[in-house]
Amino acid sequence: MITFDEVLQNKKLSELRRDEEEDLVKILSDKYGLPYVDLRGLAPEPDAMRFFKEEDARKAGVAAFKVVGRKLYIATNAPHKAEVEALVRPLETRGTELVMFLCSQASLEHVFARYADIHEGSKVAEGTLDLTLGKMESLAATFEHVSDMQKLFDELLGSNVLYKTTRLIELIIAGALKFDASDIHIEPEETTVRIRYRLNGVLEDVAYIDGVALKQITSRLKLVSGLKLSTVANAQDGRFSIDLGEVEVEVRVSVIPGNYGESFVMRLLDPRHAQSDINNIAMGVKVREAVDRALARPNGVILTTGPTGSGKTTTLYAFLRHTYSPGTKIITIEDPVEYHLDGITQTQVDEEKDYTFLSGLRASLRQDPDVIMVGEIRDEDTAKVAINAALTGHLVFSTLHTNTAAGTIPRLIDLKVNPKVIASALSLALAQRLVRTLCEHCKQEYVTNEKESRVITNALGAMKVAGMEESMMGYVPLPEYRIYKAVGCDKCSSGYAGRIGIFEAIVMSDSIELALAGNPSERDIREAAKGSKIPSLLQDAILKVLQGITSLEEIGKTVDLYGE
């Protein structure tokens, strides 16, 4: 007796229909000039799938299934559909090289079904990397020290886990956030790729990866940063953000071509670092007095100087927060806006749109401001407008490229600012540096050698000659002082933990105004300012050494210990 298996029969019919559909797509592939692909037996790459949201992919009938460098492999069953063009055009604009195939609906459904298995948190196209606070804490729990991270990289690179590229980037950034790195460096070398963090102002090696991993990371970082994937011979700048829930960390990405590939530097702008209160900035007593007097004035120019990474922006933001009140109008012109401050109108320089420091400053003066911050005075016109703004009743903050506070005045003269006007407008010139602070768990007292002792003796002697009181300066009188050196322990590894500022200030005075009549040099200004009894950068650094905050070795990297 012959039995009829309906289930088996329907299965065979379905298979036959699918085979017929695949045969039809093969025929159409010649018509459309696209290669045929059968995705039913393939495992699409999650990193490729994340280029499109599931909703958009289903609507357009497009499946991304593989990514290699800047090449994205996609398949569709309707290549001339308008939705397809709308979906892929933004990728092409950013430099993604699309490799398109023709496939059946069954192939598409096979890929679409995988969306349920992947984490949809990485919003690549939106310029946001979904590294949540929970995920960061989870990743951070897997390592204690920077030295632990190489092992994690090796384990990840040697595994077959899904979303490997995404996890590599998450690990890099989670480590940077945990160790409070200001910058992440990814540097291709001849045989390897070095990853480094800038910790407390100093670069430290984190891990080494291979060139294959670099290509994967490069593509993803370019995509999320809005950079052109096809551009490898020119420098590019972009940005993305990390959503940590209550806090959103902005990441500025810089890419430059190198001998062995593109070098990446990512600056992490954590808004929590912009919350610095002026009371938490380690200014000496005399410097703080000078700052308070300048900030209390309704007008005048306050200038900060120092090299890149010396904390000038943090200081200026602290000044802005200190002067802000609901009844005060504050406008900033920055390049770029590093942190967002509530209640303050912040604008960003855009050279392509002819919005420069000068044009922004001129425009802001028409906005009835009380306080204006200009990110940097770079030229004669900006200097003159800033000075004139102070003379017309505005409080102006800005930065200037000089090495010392005393050098500010000759620099303004070089920019063709009238010396008489400088005397009327300039309230304060502040110079600063950042030095690493000694780890309290392992710092070790030691006896100075003859050369080191002479530096300390000369600095303290000069302060006494200038009439600076020991009680006001906060140092232990000779010869009872103690100094410490860095050692290193499991709490810090380097012997240092955190950074602190060293400062000097020039306050406008009758003696400085008198000196302005004779086209003064930096030395002339320094001599005329001695009556203010404000320690120099070197002296302030020495005081912080004597207070056990930092070391002679550390300040020697920032100031000239033996030049005075």
Image (cartoon, grey):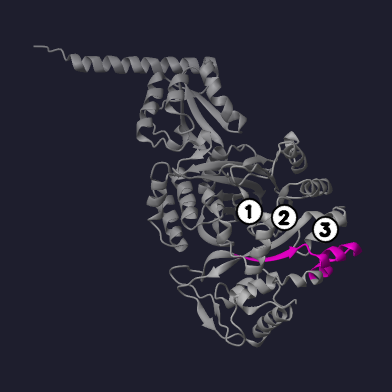
Residue at position x 77%, y 42% in the image:
358
Mark 3 = which residue?
423
Q: Does the magenta stretch include residue 45?
A: no
390 left or right, relative to 456: right
Q: Do the residues labelled 2 and 1 touch (CB within 8 Å)?
A: yes
Q: In this view, does 510 lie above or below 166?
A: below
Which mark identifies residue 302? 2
Point out residue 173 in the picture as x, y percentages from the top left corner: 49, 50
Q: Distance between the residues labelled 1 and 3?
A: 22 Å
To which quarter of the image does residue 526 belong? bottom right
Secondary structure at badge 2 equals strand
Q: Distance between the residues labelled 2 and 1?
A: 10 Å
79 left or right, relative to 516: left
Mark 1 = which residue?
319
To which quarter of the image does residue 563 belong? bottom right
Mark 1 / mark 3, whichever is N-terminal: 1
Point out residue 326 in the picture as x, y percentages from the top left corner: 58, 42
* Amino acid tagged 3: Ala
Secondary structure at badge 3 equals helix
**Mark 2 neighbour class, 10 Å CA radius: few under 14, some 14 to 19, many 20 or more:** many
437 left or right, relative to 139: right
Q: From the image, state whether disc 2 or disc 3 is nearer to you.
A: 3
Point out residue 13 in the picture as x, y percentages from the top left corner: 28, 14
Mark 2 / mark 1, whichever is N-terminal: 2
Residue range corresponding to the magenta coloring? 501-526
Q: Distance between the residues labelled 2 and 3?
A: 13 Å
